[in-house]
Amino acid sequence: MSFQSTFYRSLIYFHAIIAIAEFLLTFTLIIAVLHNSEIFFKITGPDDEDWNLIAEGYRIAIWILFLIACLLDYYHYRVWWHYKPQFTDIGFFFEMPTTPLSRKHKRYIPYHLLGDHRTESFGDRTCSAGVHCKNRQLEHIFIFHFRGYNPQRRYFDIIRADNPKNLYIGFHQTDPASAVLIAHSDFRISTGSRSTMLGHGIYFARSREGTEKKANRRGAFICAEINMGRVFYIRSHKRSVYSGKKTWWSTHDTAYYCHRDPKFDEFCVKSPNQILRWIIVIEKQFDKKVENYGLDTEFDDTKCGCF
Ligand SMILES: [Zn+2]
Ligand SMILES: [Zn+2]
């Protein structure tokens, strides 16, 4: 446990102390006003030196408390919304990139927020629209839907008018070290002949579950918004023809492979430029932050209502 995580945990109690102080201050102020209303409501303002001093003291105290509360909330917000995993176990020789995060990297989502962890109790439910959900926000898809959820129909079943920008949500699974490299630069094209069944490119599935079958690296899920461009249709029996080559690159931007089981459709894009934005989840085994900071129990413990 670092100083930061200890500070974060104590912050919750500090928050409570500030709230109590604010309450007491307001309470005594009300008492003071009730007992000396003629002074507080005098149109010319109080001339009495003592009362001036007390009023000034209250003003300063209220501002200081307000400022502290704001700083705490800001820190709280930083930890959650600009979440950064504390990587562990991701390879002895791995060095954290020093380059800034890619502009396409929207955020890391702490793993305990994934839809599979929703308890379905009040205030902790998955999306009520279920399979009919039209929300294409990447965060919404990860946080409010299960791992088998397909945000969209199979690519070729989508009516063009319903998707004028020709965007598709894709899921990619890799190991945490590769995910970090992506976050700090971009996706890279796979060219190995055995791993690229649809040809050279960057591979995606229609759901988190859809990535399981083929993933040879595990521990990190990426959910991305992709510009499909011109899409090449590959039927299930034709797949091996394109393996390890870039046959369709000259005429198309994406190859979409229709599996016999629609759950396991895959597609392959030829350029990282087609990937517009993404969010990343690092699985529990490789991220110690949620536990160190107690993020997973924060709401059960305190029911902190501040955001
Ligand atoms: Zn939804
Ligand atoms: Zn709070």
Image (cartoon, grey):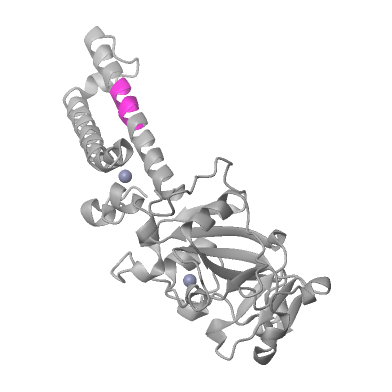
- The picture places residue 301, in percent across and down from the top left corner, at 21, 53
Q: Nearer the viewer, residue 36 or 186?
A: 186
Q: Is residue 68 left or right of residue 256?
A: left
Residue, x 72% and y 80% (percent of image)? 242
Chain part drawn in magenta: 59-66
Q: Nearer the viewer, residue 72 or 101?
A: 101
Q: Is residue 66 left or right of residue 93?
A: left
Q: Nearer the viewer, residue 119 or 112?
A: 112
Residue, x 78% and y 76% (percent of image)? 248
Q: Is the residue 294 above or below the residue 55 in the image?
A: below
Is residue 125 visible in this depiction of the protein?
no
In the image, is residue 279 part of the stretch drawn in magenta? Answer: no
Q: Is the residue 18 above or below the residue 146 in the image?
A: above
- The picture places residue 268, in percent across and down from the top left corner, at 66, 72
Is residue 157 visible in this depiction of the protein?
yes
Q: Is the residue 3 above or below the residue 88 in the image?
A: above
Q: Quadrant of residue 153?
A: bottom right
Q: Is residue 183 left or right of residue 238?
A: left
Residue, x 64% and y 86% (percent of image)? 258
In the image, is residue 61 part of the stretch drawn in magenta? Answer: yes
Predominant secondary structure, magenta span:
helix
